Amino acid sequence: MVLSEFALIERYFRKAGAMRADVRLGVGDDAALLECAAGTELVAAIDTLVEGVHFPQRSPPAAIGHRALAVNLSDLAAMGARPAWALLALTLPRLDETWLEEFTAGFADLARSHDVALVGGDTTAGPLCVSVQVLGHVAKSSALLRSGGQPGDLVFVSGTPGDAAAGLAIEQSRLSAPEEASGYLRKRFLYPTPRLALGNGLRGYASACIDISDGLLGDAGKLARASGCAVELQMRHLPISEQLLSAVGEERARELALTGGDDYELCFTVPAARVESLRHNLPPERWNYCHIGELKPGHGAAVTNAGNVIEFSHSGYDHFSR
Ligand code: ADP
Ligand code: MG
């Protein structure tokens, strides 16, 4: 590498995030020193993105930087936690300063907007791979778990699932759509929005929560399984964006909303007794979520349409099944 590892870290990573008072020691020493707030639990998540597996080759570098952080922030959102610090392990095939500049800008913009400091990482040579770890906190014993749901709890989802899967298909030239819809859908894949404010607001209302990375039906099924319940989703209640509708038509849109991946929306359950105060304190129109189903006794995930159960051949994206 032309640029020394030291110079590279100084130039791109020392300031690629928010400045926080609780960072005693950030990038530059052997490890970071972070001060944890009293009365909180430390929340940790890590996710790795491999080129050609988790994003198409030659994706915009800013989108790769944004996405690598966003998918981790989404995990913290699903726990109802606030993020504080991130570590970035970057494997680069070559030293391309233009690429690094754009990548870091995508990462840093999102990090700063959520007050996340980049406190360390590792830089190595090899096939392009980005691993981000995020650390944050949540008030003791208040985190949202997958396992807290009960039969009778109502199931909700934020945003409009299915958009990102269509966006990826457009990125890979497997789908074409009118220009306006196409721009929106591609953005939903390339620049997912971690629902941190919603996750944080749901503490005290939601009995269980999960973020949707592998598809709504599969991930709602994981929540139900962890809660020892079955889940039933109403086909007609699924929120579909007009852009997805215009790109693929109603039937395919509903299928993508159920089984498409990469949305990073939240799926959560709320006991019936708390739904009224949820709607009052977090109005669904403003917080952008809607009621899609219910937890039931038993196990499994089902979709119903006007009372009839619909069969689905697959219920989520399996990394090892292809
Ligand atoms: P060591 O060999 O002790 O692991 P490195 O030379 O790998 O140290 O890293 C020096 C400093 O730069 C460390 O504080 C490390 O956390 C930080 N660092 C290295 N790569 C990155 C990166 N991609 N993003 C953020 N910080 C990084
Ligand atoms: Mg190192």
Image: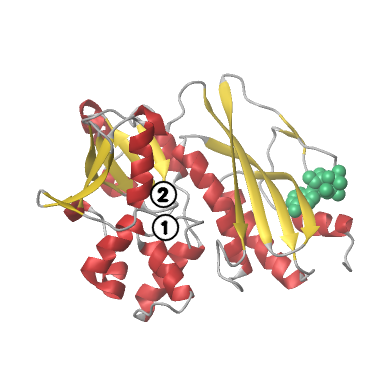
Kindly identify the residue that appears in the image at 48 percent across and 75 percent down. Answer: 172
- Three-letter code, disc 2: Ile
- At mark 1, the secondary structure is loop
Check disc 2 and report the residue beneath it.
212
Instruction: Residue at the far top: name it.
Output: 39
Front-most of residues 111 and 245: 245
Q: Distance between the residues labelled 2 and 1?
A: 7 Å
**Residue 54 seen from this side:** yes
Check disc 1 and report the residue beneath it.
261
**Residue 198 seen from this side:** no
Is residue 20 rendered to the left or right of residue 136? right
Q: Residues within 10 Å of mark 1 (few under 14, many from 20)?
A: many
- Three-letter code, disc 1: Gly
Kindly identify the residue that appears in the image at 47 percent across and 43 percent down. Answer: 196
Instruction: Residue at the far front: name it.
Output: 321
Above or below for 8 versus 77 = below
Kindly identify the residue that appears in the image at 70 percent across and 50 percent down. Answer: 88
Q: Residues within 10 Å of mark 2 (few under 14, many from 20)?
A: many
